[in-house]
Amino acid sequence: MLGQEARRRVPEPSESKQSRTRSTRQPKESLIKDRPSPERLSERLVSDRKVRAVAQAGSYGSELAWAGSVPTFITFERGLLSAQTETRSGVTLHRYPYEQLELWRDWEVARPEAPVALLATARVAYDPTGFFGRIQRTLWNLSEAQLAEYRSELLFGAAEAHRAALAAYTGPGHGPREQLLALADARDIAVKWLYPALLTHIERWPEYEIRLPHAWRASAGLRFPKAIYHLDQLYGFGGEAEAKRMLVATRGLGLVEQEKRARAAVQAGYYDGAVRFLRDESARVARTDLERWAHLSSTRRDKLGILLGVTRSPLGPGALDLVRELLDEVREGR
């Protein structure tokens, strides 16, 4: 359906000489020693004979790289029983069994189980079978009917999650705990289900870096102003001042690595990216704290309140009402 123009959007391979000719086998643990060039990192992965495909994900090593880019790689390996994700010394590795590389060439198999956005936007470095390239060509050339069906599935998932949140967090007797949990779930529904569904209207795939708000405005803001406006509303962005306020609030909450990444984004000027990242990460890491909100110290509640944006974002039913509106905007493509 997408023709030549769409096929040009398939990420260009970044194959190196060593990617085509294997070197002496080297254990994967050696990958994690420094932060050498993307080419050198992929060569180290390729040198492991179990690895049958390697691709690079994210902005690290691309023309959109910035100081906070995280080296991220995807591998398909023989002998691996299940998918694994590991991060060591600043390098993230998504590992998948080789059998899935074969199976995910079929869209009907890939759609419900594969990380399709990650695969679609990756840059292939080593692909002797050609299977990874075939997966990408499939993902970038889906028919209108296939995209519509995929969008319907995402919208259905969002609607189910929305109904569950309404049942759990709204109604008589609910207080601050439920208001905060509703906000956290509303954001999760918006980013996990509704934003990818929105992009199907323009045949694009989402990339989930710390600069996500900047990406959704650039890729969809002009076409879908109402939907993007609602996404922004959910996070209560406040520019540089809010981002710096949140950095201070992370102290003592077990968010050391998250604070480092957010600080890099602030230093680079991606203030809203830092805010979105810390809002979502604090909700994820401190989920237990949200569940037992009434038993927290006032200091801890104040810090979490800043991180979650309780004075800048809709809470409880208001957050879930916003998700319902966003769902309608995504369904209609506006």
Image (spheres, helix red, strand yellow):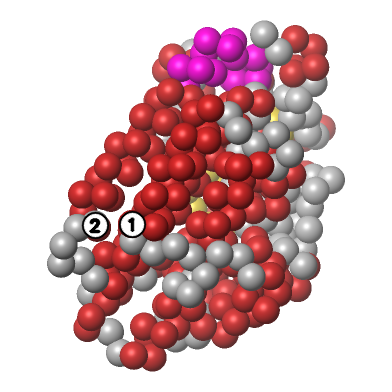
Percent x, y of residue 266: 71, 71
The residue beneath circle 1 is: 317
Residue positioned 55% across, 50% down in the render: 231
Ranked by sequence position, the earlier of labels 1 and 2 is 2
Residue positioned 30% across, 89% down in the render: 297
Relative height, residue 98 to residue 36 (above, below):
above
The amino acid sitting under disc 1 is Pro
**Quadrant of res 178:** bottom left
Percent x, y of residue 109: 42, 17
Secondary-structure class at tag 2: loop
Relative height, residue 76 to residue 212 (above, below):
above
State the residue in front, 156 or 25.
156
Which quadrant would the C terminus be assigned to in this image?
A: top right
Q: Is residue 96 magenta?
A: no
Left or right, 77 with respect to 177, comes to: right
The residue beneath circle 2 is: 170
> Visible in this render: residue 17?
yes
The amino acid sitting under disc 2 is Thr
Label 1 with label 2: CB-CB less than 8 Å: yes
* Magenta-highlighted residues: 134-150
